[in-house]
Structure formats: C-alpha cells, structure tokens
Amino acid sequence: MGCEITSKDRAGVINPMYDCQPAGAQYAGIGIKDCIPLVHGGQGCTMFVRLLFAQHFKENFDIASTSLHEDSAVFGGTKRVQEGVMVLAKRYPDLKIIPIITTCSTEVIGDDIEGTINACYKALKEELPDRKIHLVPVHTPSFKGSQVSGYDECVLSCIKTLATHKGKPSGKLNVFPGWVNPGDLGLLKHYLSEMGVEATYFMDTEDFDSPMLPDKTIHTHGRTTVEDLAHAPNALGSIALARYEGGRAAEYLKTEFEVPAIVGPTPYGIGNTDKLLQNIAALTGKEIPESLVKERGIALDALQDLAHMFFADKKVAIYGHPDLVIGLAEFCLEVELKPVLLLIGDDSSKYKKDPRLLALKERVDWDMEVVCNSDLWDLESRIRDGKVKPDLIMGHSKGRYVAMDANIPMVRVGFPTFDRAGLYRHPTIGYRGAMLLGEAIANAMFVHMEYTKNKEWLLNTW
C-alpha cells in the first residue's frame, strides 16, 4: 500500500482534460485592462477558446486573431501580425497592451515574433506617434505543455516586458492568484483587506463576474493595468498561490529585482489557508485579525459536522490543473476523504518531483495513484476496469460523462465548469471556500443516496 507517482507515455490523447498553451495565455491576457490579446495562428485558435471562456463565465471577451491561411504556412505570417496590430491600434483608442500569442503553426514555420514587434513599433511611431502601446511576445507552441503552462508563460512575459527597472517602493504586495474564479479573487481581496494589506493582483479577473449596469452596458475585462505590471519591481514582496500558474513571475522578480517571494501553497483547505495568511503576515508585518480567526472557526465547525459521519474513508478521484489537484487532495485528507487517483494532464517533468506530492506519498496509508501526462480516458478506463472504485469524482465539467456512465456522484471544480449555474461566483480557496466545497461534496453524496436509495436512511438520523 502507498502512493505511486507515474507519468504516462502516450502516443495520443483520448478525451483531453486540458486545452493548449495558447488558451492559457489568452486567459492571462484578458486579465489585463485595456488589453486585447492577438493570437498568431488559425481562426480556430481564438474562436474555440473564446467559446470555452463564454461557456464558463457566460460572458464575451475580446480576443483577436491573425487568421492565418495556407499561404502563410509557406511564406510566413509576420505580415498578418503587423496588419493585426495596426488594425487593433486604430480601432481601439484606449488600447495599451497587446500580447502576441504564438501557436503550433507559427512556431513550426519559425515566424520571428521579436523582429516583427520591432517593425510594429516603427509603424506605430510613424502612424500613431501620440500612442503608447506595449507589444508582448508570448511563445506558446501548442504541441507541448497545456493551458496551465501557457497561462504561466503569458504572466511571465508581461512582467518581463513591462517591469524593466526598480523605482520608488510602493509598499504594496504582488499577488499572483493563478487560474482561479472571480469568487476566489473576491475572497482573497477580503482577506488582505482585513489584514490591512495593499496589494496588486496579477491577473485580476474579478470583473469576469460583470455587473449589468443601468445604462444596459456590460463591461467584462481584467483589472490589472499596464502601470501595475510596470511597478511590480517596487513591491515589498510577491506571493504566488500556484506554483505552476504565476510562480515563475514571482521568482523572476525575486531574481532580477530582489523582491522577496513566496510560492505556494495553493490555499485549498484549512491548513493551506493558514499557511497563506502566515506568509502574507511574514512578508508585510501585518497581523492576522480576529475576523479571519472567526471565519476559520466557522469553516472548521461546518466541516466537522460532515467529516466523520459522511466523508470518512470515502474514496475520491481528482483531475485538473496540478495546483488544484494537489490542493484538493490535501483538503481531502483534512476531512477524512481518501484520494485514490490524481490525474494531471500535461507533459511537464516537474510534477513528479513536486514536494507536495512527495509529502502526500509519505502521509497516505492506502493505495493512491498519481498519473501525470494523463487524460480523461485514464479516469474512464480505470473505473470501468475496476482498478479504482471511487465514491466521488472531483473535476471540471468535461469529465461529467464518466461520472454519469459509472453512476458516481461528482463535484464540479476547476475550469471549465458549465453544467452548474454560477460556480465561478463561489470561492473554492480559503476558509469559506473549504466550507462551501465540503458542503458541495456532502450535497452531491446526499442527492446520490436519494436517487440510488443507498443508505438514504442515514439522512433521517443526522
């Protein structure tokens, strides 16, 4: 018995759990105010990603495409980049930054993005001398990595391009939340506000849950500004909630500008949230207020009501982003659930050496399998063949058919989630997120008990 960490050697993907690198880069890009990402590739590289965002957030986002055709594959597509930059600059007078995101086709043909950016700057100076638009090269070939590494690459590229020198100390904390929902951003801001900490968030997606205003306009955009990116080296410290989704940007600021940085842990569950608040206190010198101690106590009480009676020894299969999967596994241990299968879906060699996974390996006294470079076929086939028999599945909506076919209750968490209403609005991180997640698990189990009439009588004695 124990934990086995493997990396699947595969020739193809059956039912992928992730999208490609450019998708992640686009998600980071739309988290910036006055920004329109320009995807250098085929039309579908933008269209289908925008559809994915619209499914999850039920909102529309501005993303442009160079819309390459066959001739570009032969002769190169840099002209399309120049044309795209000029069209965006002339059409959108408030535009301040354009991440130029490469795709598999443009990386294969070898388009010189940095050289093209220099040509674009020259053209902008000639035609729009009064405008200052920052162009950011983001190299995200689709034939390796995933939306996780693409997001990380775009955040790092934006920081490298705009954060060029250290200036007057801002007294603020840099926060890299990673790929989280608007509800998570709102909760994170609540915590720092309670602690009296001023912070800048990279990338700030809180307005992705956008209001419908009296004038009937809907404004969906990121809150992180060009100025925020430029002033990142002036912060008193950086904290990254996710090792693989913004962690490299925090480390870059530490290396280049001596900005103290703490990467992780991702605050799923009580213990990880405790550590997050302690890290914020260590970087800023602020104390953790009594209000957050009370919030912690409410979450503990709520989880205690559920853990031993309903969760104990229930087996869980989890899939999704690495920081999410590992954080959820750690949360499961807190509430007496047993994670038996963790699926992480891209080809990074770093995951197998992640100290959090190695720590999990030391803690579990049951059979647990961690599969890197996996897909949802791994989940389906293991359940179908009886290699794992989970009582619960946790992951995004793309795996719902596995749960339905196997008649296993499922809790939606991660991206994309489109078959449950408003989940992007509810936090999963932090004390409140842990409480809501525990209640979602319990409710999924209760509904399943009712429909299968399996131990439904337990609810009468609760």
Image: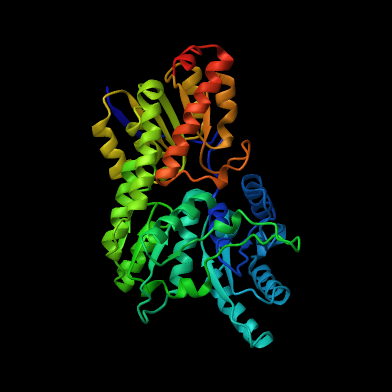
Query: Which corner quadrant holds the N terminus?
Result: top left
Residue 326: name its quadrant. Answer: top left
Q: Which residue, as the protein is rendered here, is positioned at the far left?
A: 362
Please tell me which residue lies in front, 278 or 239: 278
Q: Please tell me whether residue 233 is drawn above or below residue 429 in the rendered image.
A: below
Residue 450: name its quadrant. Answer: top right
Give me the residue at 34% from left, 27% from top.
Answer: 336
Report the number of numbered marks. 0
Give me the residue at 45% from left, 58% from top.
Answer: 189
Percent from the top left, x then y, of residue 244? 40, 51
Please tell me which residue lies in front, 232 or 367: 232
Percent from the top left, x then y, of residue 407? 55, 19
Q: Please tell me whether residue 251 is drawn above or below residue 21 in the rendered image.
A: below
- The answer to whether residue 353 is visible is no
Percent from the top left, x then y, of residue 185? 49, 54
- The answer to whether residue 127 is visible is yes
Q: Please tell me whether residue 146 is drawn above or below residue 159 in the rendered image.
A: above
Q: Is residue 132 left or right of residue 165?
A: right
Please tell me which residue lies in front, 446 or 32: 446
Q: Is residue 331 left or right of residue 223?
A: left
How does the figure colour the protein chain or chains? Answer: rainbow
Q: Which residue, as the protein is rendered here, is positioned at the far right?
A: 216
Give me the residue at 56% from left, 26% from top.
Answer: 402
Query: Which corner quadrant holds the C terminus?
Result: top left
